[in-house]
C-alpha cells in the first residue's frame, strides 16, 4: 500500500527525503516531524509576540513626514513589528474560531497565549483537517516575520559548503543566531534539499566525500 505523503509545505519537493518517505503520522495529513515542528512553533509564538511588544516599547525617535510646511517630531513605531503582532493574533484567532465552530467547543479568550494553548490542545484534530497544510504554512510565516521584526540584526546566514546529495552541487546555508528565517538546526541548499540538526554529521561527511571527489577529478 502506498504511503500518503506529508501535506506540509516543508515536505514539498526537495525536502528531507528520509522524512518524506516515512509518510504521514497515523490519522494525520502531515508527518510526525512536521507535527512536532508545528507544536513547537505554536508554543513559541507567545514569546515572539512578547518580544515584538518589547521592541514596540523602545521605538526609535525620528522625524515624521513634512506635511503642509510643518515638521512635527514624535515616536515612529516600527511597522514590521506592529504588523507581526497583529498577524500572530489574527492567525491564531482564525484557527481557534475554526476549531470552536467545527468542534462545537467554547473558544478561548482572544489573547495570544490562550489561543496558542487552545490550538496545541486540538493539534491532532487540526492536522487531520483538510486545511492542515494551510495551518502549517501560516504559523511558519508569522513566526518568521515575528523573528525578523523583533530582532532584525541578530541573524546571519552561514555558507557551509556544497550539498552532498547525489547530483547536487548547490551551496548549503544555515541561519546562525536565534532569529533566522529557518527553524533552529535547519540547513538548506540552493536546490531546496533540507538538512535537520540530527543530520548535520551526515551532511559534513557527505560534503567531505564530495570535496574529495571534486579534488580527485581536478588533479
Image (spheres, rainbow, N blue to C red):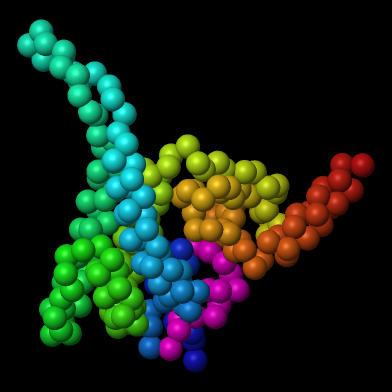
Q: Nearer the viewer, residue 205 or 79?
A: 79
Quadrant of res 42:
bottom left
Q: Farthest top residue? A: 69
Query: Residue drawn 21% across and 63% down?
Result: 111
Residue 137 showing in the rendered view: no
Extent of the magenta region: 12-26
Q: Farthest right residue? A: 219
Quadrant of res 62:
top left
Position of the C terminus, as image quadrant, is: top right
Query: Residue drawn 24% across and 69% down?
Result: 115
Q: Is residue 117 left or right of residue 99?
A: right
Query: Residue drawn 36% across and 50% down?
Result: 51
Quadrant of res 73:
top left
| Residue 18 colored in magenta in the image | yes
Q: Is residue 127 above or below residue 37?
A: below
Return the x and y of residue 17 as percentages of the image width and height: 58, 70
Q: Which secondary structure class fits the magenta region best?
A: loop
Q: Is residue 109 left or right of residue 184?
A: left
| Residue 163 colored in magenta in the image | no
Return the x and y of residue 74 as percentages of the image width and height: 20, 24
Q: Is residue 118 above or below residue 216?
A: below
Q: Nearer the viewer, residue 69 or 164?
A: 69
Q: Is residue 87 above or below residue 139?
A: above
Return the x and y of residue 125 as percentages of the image width and height: 30, 83
Q: Farthest left residue? A: 68
Query: Residue drawn 49% across and 91% down?
Result: 1
Q: Is residue 35 above or below residue 68?
A: below
Residue 103 showing in the rendered view: yes
Amino acid at each position: 500500500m502506498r504511503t500518503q505523503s506529508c501535506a506540509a509545505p516543508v515536505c514539498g519537493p526537495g525536502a528531507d527525503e528520509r522524512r518524506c518517505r516515512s509518510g504521514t503520522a497515523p490519522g494525520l495529513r502531515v508527518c510526525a516531524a512536521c507535527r512536532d515542528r508545528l507544536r513547537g512553533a505554536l508554543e513559541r509564538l507567545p514569546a515572539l509576540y512578547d518580544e515584538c511588544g518589547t521592541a514596540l516599547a523602545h521605538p526609535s525617535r525620528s522625524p515624521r513626514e513634512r506635511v503642509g510646511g510643518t515638521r512635527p517630531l514624535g515616536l515612529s513605531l516600527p511597522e514590521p513589528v506592529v504588523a507581526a503582532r497583529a498577524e500572530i493574533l489574527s492567525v491564531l484567532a482564525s484557527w481557534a474560531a475554526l476549531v470552536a465552530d467545527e468542534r462545537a467547543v467554547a473558544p478561548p479568550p482572544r489573547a495570544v497565549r490562550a489561543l496558542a494553548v487552545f490550538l496545541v490542545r486540538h493539534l491532532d484534530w487540526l492536522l487531520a483537517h483538510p486545511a492542515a497544510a494551510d495551518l502549517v504554512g501560516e504559523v511558519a510565516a508569522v513566526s518568521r516575520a515575528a523573528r525578523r521584526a523583533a530582532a532584525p540584526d541578530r541573524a546571519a546566514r552561514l555558507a557551509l559548503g556544497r550539498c552532498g546529495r547525489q547530483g547536487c552541487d548547490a551551496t548549503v546555508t544555515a541561519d546562525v543566531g536565534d532569529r533566522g528565517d529557518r527553524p533552529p538546526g535547519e540547513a538548506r541548499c540552493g536546490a531546496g534539499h533540507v538538512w535537520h540538526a540530527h543530520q548535520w554529521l551526515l551532511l559534513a561527511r557527505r560534503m567531505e566525500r564530495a570535496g574529495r571527489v571534486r579534488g580527485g577529478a581536478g588533479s
